[in-house]
Image (cartoon, rainbow, N blue to C red):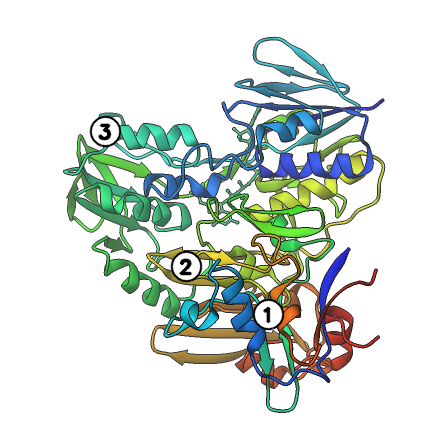
């Protein structure tokens, strides 16, 4: 299945992926109107120590420990995508306790949010990939 | 075609169904549970009291799931005996098995206390039924006494907070969450909970009940309308003991989740397993381990090969928005950070991270948990950087290339 991969050599650390991700969920037409002066809760985050930089999002692990550990039954795997049922999540953060990548984050309601490869919005292809100016994030079949 | 029988309908049982079906799509699976619901999110009963979830949303899988996986779910039925090739239920029915999973979980332990019979409204807090009964007995003027400041007692207190007038929590220990926190962290958590108005009486216990008054060892007395007993749980081992399985505190299983009796497996709160951070056998009564243990048992019951050999105790709990994450053992060299309401304590031993307590800011804690579970030698990563800021940056670029992609 196609997944998101990053190439740290090409990442500019521009954080555009974070904005594109946050914008993808809004359903609005204009990014600056949708996000201006708002705190954003992107599901992809740039890690940057000044020398190395790359964008990190859910790996949709084959043997996803977050799904196995979810105390509310909110996480599941459908067609290879680790999905979250927002209605069921109560924000206990057990998934944050177990994710080896640190890829699950809290949203504005303190519940958990995560990358679902833009299957949960109308973007089609992942918005972070489409908007990356240097092709440092790609959406490919690799297995 | 194999006959699989599963006793209990908790998350270990559900994991077992997934495990069996990953290796055998035909075998007949019968799940027998004395509760009236298929596997549900037990830890969410306090969130139900808070109106943050509903009984429907608490159902761990959809009803269709059991049909799709071809599982015969028998509810409201208690297994009273395990025989060599079958189990017998209360109503005299017999279910034949080739492979059996006992995932009977644990039950609240209620110590004998003088005058307990004189308490009119008393509850334990483990099941949906307990929760619905408790909900019915309270109103906005109720005064609640909770005996036990462990996870279950405190979660119950949080769940009831906005629905009642007053809550007092007492515990024999001198701190809250005594099994997972040290005194400093426990005091911090206690202060945060106290801000909500919940009161504590620690290092004190009930000597005697006189109707709706608890006379404490210290001499104090507490008036209440509703009592919740939450001093601890005991594994439901009786059935397995009867058939001759080795039982210490919990049922003894190997890494494959097999008991000492042929064809009988066990998983979840009922078993004791090896904690790799201390190399000791323990009951680690947490939901992730119940699922993973059940899954592993299921695979092996279906003649597949699986081992659950990296178990650790771990918890992620929040009270009124304040988060607590703990894992492993608190032993060895300590690395500490304190910043306002946030505390981080990492325990390092023999070139491995073996435990942590993290309060407040808990982002990316999974990176620490994974170092513990994988027994990662700390000299293979830049641990000085990770201990300050958990991220993948201090790992080797090879590790990142493997896991995040990059030019191959
Ligand atoms: C209030 C509360 C909060 C919790 N919070 C957390 C948390 O935040 N994180 C976490 O990881 N864990 C938490 N836990 C613990 C977690 O719920 C358990 O570890 C987990 O449910 C264990 O699953 P299990 O399948 O082993 O057992 P159980 O869920 O106890 O299921 C066993 C089932 O078997 C049934 N049964 C027993 N004997 C028989 C019999 N003879 N015949 C038929 N049926 C039988 C029982 O009635 C029960 O339905 C919490 C528990 C409680 C009560």
Q: Residues within 10 Å of mark 2 (few under 14, many from 20)?
A: some
What chain letter is assigned to the residue under label 1? Answer: B
State the image coordinates of residue B182 (x, y, percent, origin top left): 42, 66
Quarter placement of the N terminus of chain A: bottom right
Callout 2 secondary element: loop
Is B61 drawn above or below residue A110 in the view shown? Answer: above
- Closest to the camera, between mark 3 and mark 2, is 2
Q: Nearer the viewer, residue A84 or B117?
A: A84
Kindly identify which residue carries mark 1: B368
Q: State left or right for residue B65 relative to residue B200.
A: right
Q: Residue furthest bottom?
A: A51
Is A10 drawn above or below residue B102 in the view shown? Answer: below
What chain letter is assigned to the residue under label 2? Answer: A
Kindly identify which residue carries mark 2: A110
Can residue B116 be seen?
yes
What chain letter is assigned to the residue under label 3? Answer: B
Determine the CA span between mark 3 and mark 1: 46 Å
Callout 1 secondary element: helix
> Quarter of the image holding residue A132?
bottom right
- Closest to the camera, between mark 2 and mark 1, is 2
At 64% across and 58% down in the image, what residue appears? A117
Can residue B177 be seen?
no
At 63% across and 48% down in the image, what residue appears? A68
Kindly identify which residue carries mark 3: B119
Q: State left or right for residue A140 relative to residue B387.
A: right
Determine the CA span between mark 3 and mark 2: 39 Å
């Amino acid at each position: 299945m196609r997944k998101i991969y990053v190439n740290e050599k090409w990442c500019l650390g521009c954080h555009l992926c974070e904005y594109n991700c946050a914008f993808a969920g809004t359903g609005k037409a204009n990014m600056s109107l949708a996000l201006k002066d708002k705190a954003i809760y992107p599901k992809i985050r740039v890690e940057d120590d000044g020398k190395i930089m790359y964008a990190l999002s859910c790996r949709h692990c084959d043997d996803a420990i977050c799904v196995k550990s979810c105390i509310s039954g909110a996480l599941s795997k459908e067609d290879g995508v680790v999905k979250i049922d927002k209605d069921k999540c109560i924000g206990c953060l057990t998934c944050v306790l177990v994710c080896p990548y640190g890829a699950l984050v809290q949203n504005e309601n303190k519940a958990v949010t995560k990358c679902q490869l833009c299957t949960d919005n109308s973007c089609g292809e992942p918005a972070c990939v489409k908007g990356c100016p240097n092709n440092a994030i790609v959406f490919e079949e690799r297995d | 075609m194999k006959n699989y029988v599963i006793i209990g309908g908790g998350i270990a049982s559900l994991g077992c169904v997934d495990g069996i079906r990953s290796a055998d799509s035909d075998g007949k699976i019968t799940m027998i549970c004395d509760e009236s619901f298929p596997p549900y999110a037990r830890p969410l009963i306090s969130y139900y009291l808070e109106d943050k979830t509903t009984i429907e949303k608490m159902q761990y899988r959809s009803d269709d799931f059991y049909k799709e996986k071809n599982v015969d779910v028998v509810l409201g039925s208690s297994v009273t005996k395990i025989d060599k090739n079958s189990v017998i239920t209360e109503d005299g029915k017999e279910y034949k098995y080739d492979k059996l999973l006992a995932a009977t979980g644990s039950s609240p332990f209620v110590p004998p206390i003088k005058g307990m019979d004189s308490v009119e409204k008393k509850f334990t807090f483990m099941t949906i039924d307990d929760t619905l009964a408790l909900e019915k007995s309270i109103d906005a003027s109720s005064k609640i006494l909770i005996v036990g400041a462990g996870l279950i007692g405190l979660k119950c207190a949080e769940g009831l907070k906005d629905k009642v007038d007053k809550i007092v929590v007492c515990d024999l220990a001198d701190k809250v969450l005594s099994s997972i926190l040290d005194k400093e962290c426990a005091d911090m958590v206690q202060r945060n909970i106290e801000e909500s108005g919940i009161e504590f009486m620690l290092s004190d216990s009930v000597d005697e009940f006189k109707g709706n008054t608890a006379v404490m060892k210290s001499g104090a007395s507490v008036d209440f309308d509703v009592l919740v007993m939450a001093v601890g749980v005991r594994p439901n081992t009786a059935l397995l003991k009867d058939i001759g399985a080795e039982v210490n505190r919990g049922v003894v299983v190997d890494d494959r989740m097999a008991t000492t009796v042929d064809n009988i497996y066990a998983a979840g709160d009922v078993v004791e397993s090896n904690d790799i951070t201390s190399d000791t056998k323990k009951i680690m009564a947490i939901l992730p381990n119940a699922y993973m243990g059940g899954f592993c048992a299921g695979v092996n019951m279906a003649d597949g090969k699986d081992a659950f050999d990296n178990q650790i105790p771990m918890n992620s709990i929040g009270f009124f928005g304040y988060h607590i994450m703990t894992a492993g053992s608190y032993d060895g060299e300590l690395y500490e950070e304190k910043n306002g309401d946030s505390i981080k304590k990492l325990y390092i031993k023999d070139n491995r991270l073996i435990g942590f307590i993290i309060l407040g800011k808990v982002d990316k804690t999974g990176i620490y948990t994974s170092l513990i579970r994988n027994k990662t030698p700390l000299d293979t990563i830049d641990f000085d950087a990770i201990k300050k800021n958990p991220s993948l940056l201090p790992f080797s670029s090879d590790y990142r290339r493997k896991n995040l992609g990059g030019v191959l």
